[in-house]
Image (cartoon, rainbow, N blue to C red):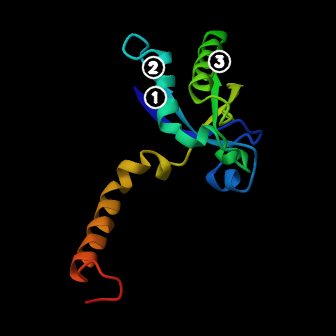
Amino acid sequence: MATRVGYTGGDTPAPTYDSVCDGDGHTEAIRVTFDPAVLTYEQLLVHFWDVSGSRAFKRRPKAQYKSAVWVVDEDQRAAVDASIAQLRASIGDDEEVVTEVLEFQSWADAEERHQSYMRKHRAAKATRAADAQQWVNAWGGREGGR
């Protein structure tokens, strides 16, 4: 399985992070390439709902952050529709699933600095977390010092 971060769903022929932030209609997205003999589309959808969490239930004010699944054929659309029906049945009437199901139109890879972002920044995050923990330990975990 492989992933790429990019932009889809808008009308700008060559979107950039800045144009997407400025509201060109594209959504920041992840493109997943997978082997269906190893991971089925249905299994991928289960993972999507797991990692989407509350984002599947909250409307976003900008296209940049909307929750969506872009399908390439009717089989994928049927699988997504079925998985949404299962999700709705499991959550009842308390929440609305706002994830859109859209036809795939175009894709543009995001700039290289956005690819594997979490892996690239994990070390920096871990360092900041360790620094913060050291600060807490040095101050005895009390606000305002010793």
Question: Is mark 3 in CB contact (under 8 Å) with mark 2?
Answer: no
Report the Cα–Cα distance between label 2 and label 1: 6 Å
Q: Pointer 3: what residue?
A: 81
Residue 139 found in image quarter:
bottom left
Depth check: give the residue in front, 138 or 76. 138
Which comes before the other along the chain, label 3 or label 1?
1
Tell me the residue at 36%/14% (across/down). 38
Q: Amino acid at mark 3?
A: Asp
Q: Residue furthest front?
A: 93
Q: Pointer 2: what residue?
A: 43
Dot 2: element: helix
Mark 3, Cα crowd under 10 Å, few <14 / some 14-19 / many 20+, is few
Tell me the residue at 75%/42% (across/down). 12
Q: Amino acid at mark 2?
A: Gln
Tell me the residue at 70%/47% (across/down). 60
Residue 47's label in the rendered image is 1
Q: Is residue 20 above or below residue 40?
A: below
Q: Quadrant of the C terminus?
A: bottom left
Q: Amino acid at mark 1?
A: His
Mark 1, Cα crowd under 10 Å, few <14 / some 14-19 / many 20+, is few
Residue 127 placement (x, y as % from top left): 28, 65
Which comes before the other along the chain, label 3 or label 2?
2
